[in-house]
Image (tube, rainbow, N blue to C red):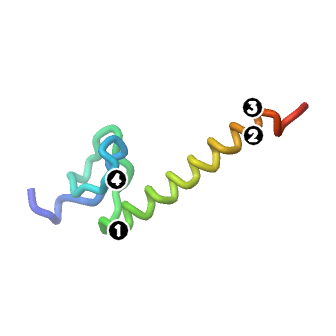
Amino acid sequence: MSDNDKQWYFNMVKGRAELGPISPIEQRMGPYKTKEDAEHAWDIVADRNAKWEEQNRQWNGEGYRR
């Protein structure tokens, strides 16, 4: 398999960008054209997840009353 048959994915289990086959396996986010694109996309997801976790803590804690 040549590099032309592969694309960049972010392996969410290993926490790194990898060059892999076009058909992604489970636990991969992508495909992306470059390693930097895959890493940038993961940074966005990680930032969003951190914001969601903080919001959930606020909703489940003292900061939120019905």
Q: Determine which of the numbered discs, if any, sits on residue 36 in the image.
A: 1
In this rendering, position of residue 44 left or right of residue 28: right
- Distance CA(mark 2)–CA(mark 4): 30 Å
* Mark nearer the N terminus (2 vs 1): 1
Look at 34% across and 49% down and name the residue there. 15
In the picture, the disc for residue 52 is none
- In terms of image quadrants, where is residue 1? bottom left
Instruction: Locate residue 48, reporting x and y percent.
Output: 58, 52
Q: CA distance from mark 4 to mark 1?
A: 10 Å
Residue 7 vs residue 37: left or right?
Answer: left
Label 1 crowd bin: few (<14), some (14–19), many (20+), radius 10 Å:
few
User: At label 3, which amino acid type do we have?
Assistant: Asn
In space, the residues marked 2 and 1 are separated at their CA atoms by: 33 Å
- Inspect the image, locate mark 1, and give the three-letter code of the amino acid beneath it: Glu
The kind of residue tagged 2 is Gln
Three-letter amino acid code of the residue under disc 4:
Phe
Instruction: Say if mark 2 contacts mark 3, CB within 8 Å.
Output: yes
- In primary-sequence order, the first of circles 3 and 4 is 4
Residue reaching furthest front?
Answer: 62
Look at the numbered disc 2 and give the secondary structure of its residue.
Answer: helix
How many other residues sit within 10 Å of disc 4, few (<14), some (14-19) or many (≥20)? many
What is the crowding at mark 3: few (fewer than 14 residues within 10 Å), some, or many (at least 20)? few
Labelled pair 3, 4 in contact (Cβ < 8 Å): no
| Disc 4 secondary structure class | strand
Q: Is residue 12 above or below residue 1?
A: above
Query: Is residue 18 placed above or below 36 in the rendered structure?
Result: above
Residue at the disc numbered 4: 10
- The residue under label 3 is 60
